[in-house]
Amino acid sequence: MAQLTKKQIKRQDFVDNEIFELIKRLAPSAKIKWDIEIIADVRESIRIQLINKKKIKSEMGFYPYIKI
């Protein structure tokens, strides 16, 4: 069974944490709790811009995943 490497997991954590911090900075007066659904929605929007439109990074380089 395929597994992500520690480096890939670290990248996922980094991306998700940075998105969460961005959300909190954009609404500083709100008490925002970790919500992976919201984070994933924002991540998908960023992915579309960086990968599909601007071709800045590869999909796996931006947010590694296991293809099933």
Image: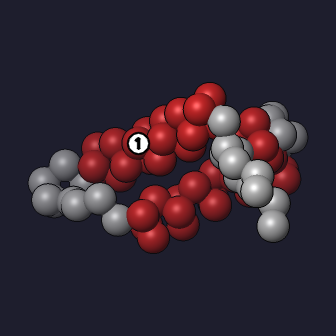
- Residue at (29% x, 44% y) in the render: 25
Mark 1: which secondary structure? helix
- Residue 4, given in percent of the width and then of the height, sits at 67, 44
Q: Is 60 displayed left or right of 41 in the figure?
A: right
Residue 15 shows in this picture:
no
Q: Is 41 displayed left or right of 1 in the figure?
A: left
- Residue 1, given in percent of the width and then of the height, sits at 76, 56
The front one of 49 and 16 is 16
- Residue 48, given in percent of the width and then of the height, sits at 74, 56
Q: Is 63 displayed left or right of 61 in the figure?
A: left
- Residue 14, given in percent of the width and then of the height, sits at 49, 36
Which quadrant holds the C terminus? bottom right
- What amino acid type is highlighted by mark number 1? Asn
The front one of 21 and 14 is 14
As displayed, is residue 32 above or below residue 55? below
Residue 36's quadrant in the figure?
bottom left
- Residue at (37% x, 49% y) in the render: 20
Q: Tell me the residue that label 1 is attached to.
A: 17
As displayed, is residue 37 above or below residue 27? below
